[in-house]
Amino acid sequence: MGSRRPGLPCVEAKRRIPVHLPYRSDLSQLHAVARPGVSIGSLLRISVTVTAESEEVVAELLAELLGQPASIYHEVERGITTASVYLPKPRDWSPTKRARLLAGLGRIQACGLAVGPAEVSARRIRREDWAESWKRHFRPITIASALLVKPSWSKRRGRRGQAVVTLDPGLSFGTGQHPTTRFCLEQLVARRIPDRAQSFLDMGTGSGILAIAAVKLGYRRVEAFDLDPDAVRVARANSRQNGVAGKLNVRRQDLTRLPARMPQFEVVCANLLFDLLLTQKRRIVARVKPNGFLVLAGVLSSQFATLCQQYEGTGLKLVSRRKENEWESGAFFLPERKLADKSRL
């Protein structure tokens, strides 16, 4: 979620990138262009080595310049993050495109966002049936014993009493593989009270994974929104695939224009960009019911202390946190407020 400034990829222009994968194999990034029936013998991979803080905006620059979905790949052992685009037609890459890419990286740096090495490389990918080979890198994910998230081609079945979400990697953020999404799923399981009709709101739903999982876990009155119309479309399609379309409401909504009189929810997840979490703090906290929980994710570890300070200043109490790789997420509890305390918002 967030606004985009054409021609100037800057901090404010960041948004969710279609796929963010922590795997050590490039195979997992090819799903956007390696669809069944597509000839991919001449794929060309264009990559830029970047910092964790600039990965999303650099990936968007690549996607806009080259017209293909961008992927982000983090090699844990070497601590290197790479943003890549795969071109079905190598001729789409040229010295002019390279110059424009370098100019864009310079503008990002000028905005105050460190891009790191920013080394640009182009590599041909050998002939292979990528459409099937990348699938082995998307394995089922188990959250405690309550939830199983798996791709449609997996034959794994849920255990007795285990909720199952079927979700294929696609063009919207959220497959459960990323640490921030996984933390949100874990909190959905941890905050669920059996035999109670709890409500749930997903801010920046992406693929719809959190809202779908919430319905499967027994939450009732489940709502989700995203600014990106493509994300809304994908989330609705995923909800239909999981047979829960009639049990949740997914809509397009700009967080910065969220209505003042929107209902409150017992559990709220906001897996968003750091800037949005700060600037829209009041709107986000206002959606949490007293004695409810707010889950914040999508920020770097270096940003988490500032985030905590800002949200604890509204009366929230940090009850759980998780640091994984360069990411950190937290769950907050909102106690009943006295009348005088409401001014803190």
Image (cartoon, rainbow, N blue to C red):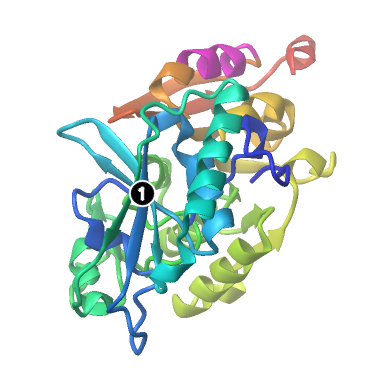
- Examine the image and state in which quarter residue 26 appears: bottom left
Q: Residue at x 30, y 70 (%)?
A: 151
> Looking at the picture, does residue 279 appear above or below residue 195?
above
Image side of residue 281 versus residue 213, left or right = right
Residue at the farthest right position: 260
Tell me the residue that label 1 is attached to: 47
Q: Nearer the viewer, residue 183 or 194?
A: 183
Residue 187 percent coordinates (x, y): 40, 40
- The part of the chain drawn in magenta is 305-313
Q: Residue at x 54, y 40 (%)?
A: 57
Secondary structure beneath disc 1? strand
Hey, what amino acid is under mark 1? Answer: Ser
> Looking at the picture, does residue 259 appear above or below residue 65?
above
Residue at the farthest left position: 77
Residue 193 percent coordinates (x, y): 43, 46
Q: Nearer the viewer, residue 107 or 154?
A: 107
